[in-house]
Image (cartoon, grey):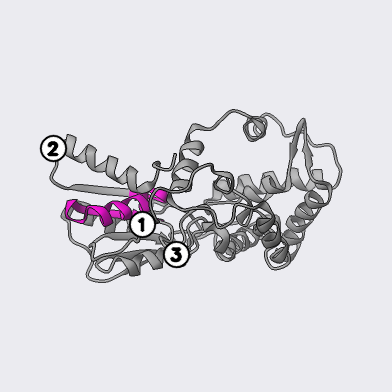
Amino acid sequence: MPHASTRNVARDLDLVRAALGERRISYLGWSYGGYLGAVYARLFPHRVARMVLDSAPDPQTYGPDGERDHYAAQAAEQENWVAWEARRRGTTPAAVRATVDAIREVADRHGTLTIGRHTVDPNLVRRLALGTDTEELYGRWSDLLALFAAAARGEPVTPGPQWEPFFESLSSREVDAGASAFAASLCADRAAYSRGPEAYFRDIRAHRVSEPMYGPVNRNVTPCTFWPTAPAEPPTRVGGALPALLVGATGDPSTPYAGQQVLHGALRGSRMVSLHGAFRHGVYSWDANPCVDGVVVAYLLGGRLPASDVTCTRSSPTGPTGPGGS
């Protein structure tokens, strides 16, 4: 298990390159894939042709406790949804915010919410963060919050056929192979900051007032807290003069934009394509933004980076100024 690190994944990736008989690789990676690409470039800089890193995490904090500084970005995304929901319902942002707070407070006080035959704990309520600002997902989040709000008021709630599979999957005890593999890699990259659950509990209590919604999840224990082995190698120091193209949304709640800027600064030859006004994780090809997609495609096909960083604008933003009608 100590050898399941991103550094070793990058070494495996280079074995694939060699097996294919390629002198260099062109690479496109989202999220963790962006971090993997940066690590590969650190280990094998002379084997990189073109590289696009989309929504990559902060390389200095990536690890089992890397979400402890995500609260501001997550809260900003929630506020964007709050504004959208207020427009959709014909109410005020304060009223929507009060509903969300009431759900959280009831879940904290009673330990669970009852949704049909399912129980939902407070951490699950918090983990149902949005992740992207599409009309479809915002609408689903709105419908889900209506179920939670009714349960918080003590009303009997039946999820209905459209939600039953969702709650069934959340309460399933089946092992998720993908999540298990990711945990192994995460714990092999960097050790948890503490092996004692008490340290995490103190941290949660210290931030409960300032980070009421997402703090208890971001600062909670992870599998790495109890991982039986230590990393075999120190964390990779990402950097160099790699001429990569970085892509990110300014409101990314999962790998905050500030961390993406850290990677941009570490890769001195890179250029950054920023999608301004977007609250989403994953940009190129996911948002169908012609400005972003045009820059990325031109680079992948022609191999030339933009002369400077590029700022694009969300095509049809949700939130206070975007669609919100039912």
Query: What distance separates the C-alpha of mark 1 from that of mark 3?
Result: 16 Å
User: Which residue is drawn at the image coordinates 56% and 65% (left, top)?
Assistant: 321
Q: Is residue 169 left or right of residue 30?
A: right
The residue that disc 3 covers is 259
x, y percent for residue 194 = 59, 56
x, y percent for residue 317 = 50, 60
User: Which residue is drawn at the image coordinates 40% and 48% (left, top)?
Assistant: 232
Front: mark 2 or 1: 1
Query: Quick one: label 2, few (<14), some, or many (20+) residues within 10 Å?
Result: few
The residue that disc 1 covers is 236
Query: Quick one: label 1, few (<14), some, or many (20+) residues within 10 Å?
Result: some
Q: Is the residue 112 above or below the residue 194 in the image? A: above
What is the three-letter code of the residue carrying label 1?
Answer: Thr
Question: Is 104 a magenta residue?
Answer: no
- Magenta-highlighted residues: 29-55
Q: Judging from the image, what secondary structure is the residue with disc 3 in?
A: helix
Residue 286 visible in this rendered orientation of the protein:
no
Query: What distance separates the C-alpha of mark 3 from that of mark 2?
Result: 35 Å
What is the three-letter code of the residue carrying label 2?
Answer: Gly
Q: Are marks 3 and 2 in contact (CB under 8 Å)?
A: no
Q: Judging from the image, what secondary structure is the residue with disc 2 in?
A: loop
Question: Is 40 a magenta residue?
Answer: yes
x, y percent for residue 1 = 44, 39
Seen from the viewer's position, the closer of residues 46 and 316 is: 46
x, y percent for residue 230 = 47, 48
The residue that disc 2 covers is 21
Of pointers 3 and 2, the one earlier in the residue sequence: 2
Q: Is residue 206 left or right of residue 153?
A: left
